[in-house]
Amino acid sequence: MAGTPIIKVFLDASVLVAASASVNGASAYILHLARQRKIKAFVSEDALSEAVKNVNLKLGDIGKERLNAYLIRANLKLVISPEAEAIALCEKFIHFKDAPILAAALSAKADILLSLDKKHFFTKSVADFAKAMKIFTAGDFLKRFFR
């Protein structure tokens, strides 16, 4: 990827949780790329709090330790929660619980939104609304851009 601009990637909570569950998966490798500054990774306050909640509920101490290590080392850029109007607009295209994530990714001007939530993020209406921002799973992103 020499000579090409660094891809701006927004991480949904599901990617952070998956990385915390397994150091060998695609989500963990995404955070490795962010740490190496091969991608510019963004996360919102909402995605971060959701990830912390889910890791605490589901993964135990090792998951908590991994998440904390990623947050310290992965060079994640924090996106402030979007305005209520932006979230309300996104609610027209995605489940209301995911609207703050979509709005934050758009406000960050991310090139890519990474999520493992295929039910809500991988719909035609979301793709049409997000237009230039593409949505991938972590694995599909790696296959497309880092193979």
Image: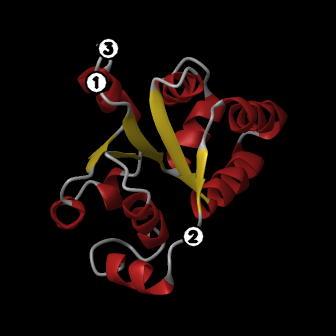
In the rendered image, which residue does mark 3 sit on?
Answer: 2
Question: What secondary structure is found at the residue carrying circle 1?
Answer: loop
Badge nearest the viewer, 3 or 2 = 3
Does residue 110 sit above or below 143 in this rendering?
A: below
Earlier in the chain: of badge 1 and badge 2, it is: 1
For mark 2, give the secondary structure: loop
Q: Nearer the viewer, residue 65 or 131?
A: 131
Name the one closer to the observer, 138 or 73. Answer: 73
Q: Find out whether the residues at labels 3 and 1 contact each other: C-beta distance under 8 Å.
A: yes
Q: Position of residue 121 (x, y in %)?
A: 32, 57
Instruction: Name the residue type under label 3.
Output: Ala
With 117 as the anchor, is 136 left or right in this view? left
User: Label 1 belongs to which residue?
Assistant: 4
Task: Residue 42: give x, y in percent of width and height.
Answer: 52, 47
Q: CA distance from mark 3 to mark 1?
A: 6 Å
At label 1, which amino acid type do we have? Thr
Question: Would you identify the image quadrant in which residue 5 lies?
Answer: top left
Residue 81: mark: 2
- In which quadrant will I find the C terminus? top left
Residue 6, horizontal then vertical, whole percent: 38, 31
Separation (CA) of disc 3 from disc 2: 33 Å
Q: Residue 60, relative to residue 83: is it above or below?
A: above
Residue at the location (34% across, 61% down)? 120
* Left or right: 7, with 20 as reference point: left
